Image (spheres, helix red, strand yellow):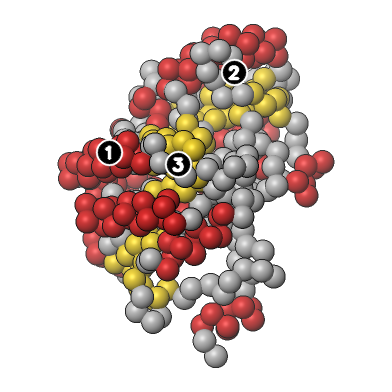
Amino acid sequence: MSLANRDLQVIWHPYTQMQTAQPPIPIVRGEGTCLYDEDGKKYIDAISSWWVNIHGHSHPYIAQKIAEQLNKLEHVIFAGFTHQGAIELAERLLNILPANQAKAFYSDNGSTAVEVAIKMCLQYWHNKGQQRTKILAFKNAYHGDTFGAMSVSGRSAFTAAFDSLLFEVEFIDLPTAENIENIKAQISSLKSELSCFIFEPLVQGSAGMVMYDAEYLEELMAHCRQEGVLLIADEVFTGFGRTGKSFACDHVSTQPDIMCFSKGLTGGTMAFGLTTCTQEIYNAFLSDDKMKTLFHGHSYTANPVACAAALASLDLFLAPSTQDNIDRIVVKHSQFANKVAGHRSIKTTRQTGTILALEWETGNNTSYFSSLRDTLYHYFLDAGIILRPLGNIIYILPPYCITDAELDYIYSVIEKALDEI
Ligand SMILES: Cc1ncc(COP(=O)(O)O)c(C=O)c1O
């Protein structure tokens, strides 16, 4: 039996309607920006395998560091024990994050990084004896699939079956020149109840690569700070160069109280999550009273192999050639966006850093369930490109090592699709 058929016997895939989905494509090898299936067909991974991969697949340097770590120490309980990799990673990351970030809390993925951030905020106020339990978030936000992360995400098809069980959140629009004063007034009217504001800085990935201005994010963050509302920047997607700078928060001057990371943290090699916070947040948990402890942890917290992968990825990320590659992708994306902007099949183009999104004109409203999605997905797969449209929105989000020739090939297939579909 083929791998695909064996898969269908035993596996339930994420975000997949198993009754109607095509059999999955068995991938046997990855190298650079490319993945190879069992028949040897090559695919350019233009979405960095769900936005995680930043240096290319099976990177030899990361692989070597992981192998060395595996032969030394594969795992150790992280309560009562520590290890070199976890310490060094925290030291080095805190060095490049906004200056107020002081402590690192490890977990397993983006959703858990968000859960930890929410719990830090809610318990911060609890430990201080203040009743601030409401959370502020953007409509259409996506912060993950666990219950806390779902609660602070916009209500959508993803959450519909659970809506009545999710905790209440105050949702606001993305800030613009027109609505910023109203949003600020809304926040001020609720301020004594609000514990925190969680946001995806600059780009809402899952919402369809929806982008908004740093200027209004800055204004919103400064206002929350003034009103005593804690700021959680969810950089799970935007972190590690995606927006052109190391972190999306580098585009604003107000520093968040808490930050969440995953995806690019290990260069896309290991499941890993990280929540960082200020000394002020951390201090609110220090007490002789054990009830003020942050009672949160996962079996694999600060896994040494994941730390080794993250340290190796950080070495590569901080090499000047990586920023050069990011700058190169930014320029090429914008040249391509300008070229296709007037095409009859394009509704809008938008770009932040290395993220380029094109909204296909369907004659209907933009929708995650657009029937165009499957047509586009298979069109690009046939051409050897993995682009996974969000409804009628396609986006290119490549590993930074993608070559000009590979980018040009992706652009040319998109242009062909614009004419043909
Ligand atoms: C902004 C943001 N936060 C959180 C998550 C959840 O991360 P994970 O899928 O690792 O749980 C995602 C995933 O796409 C995300 O884009």
Residue occupied by mark 2: 229
C-alpha distance separating marks 2 and 1 = 40 Å
Tell me, yes or no, whether the two marked residues, 1 and 3, touch with CB atoms within 8 Å. no
Q: Is residue 214 left or right of residue 407?
A: right
x 31%, y 60%: residue? 33
Mark toward the start of the polypeptide (1 vs 3): 1
Residue occupied by mark 3: 344
Q: Is residue 198 left or right of residue 159?
A: left
Mark toward the start of the polypeptide (2 vs 3): 2
Near-viewer residue (185 or 363): 363
x 54%, y 20%: residue? 175
Residue type pointed to by label 3? Arg
Quadrant holding the N terminus: bottom right
Which numbered disc, 1 or 3, marks the residue closer to the eye?
3
Name the element at disc 3.
Answer: loop
Residue furthest bottom as drawn: 1
Residue occupied by mark 1: 335
Indicate the quadrant where residue 197 lies.
Answer: top right
C-alpha distance separating marks 1 and 3 = 18 Å
- Answer whether residue 409 is visible to the viewer in this image: yes
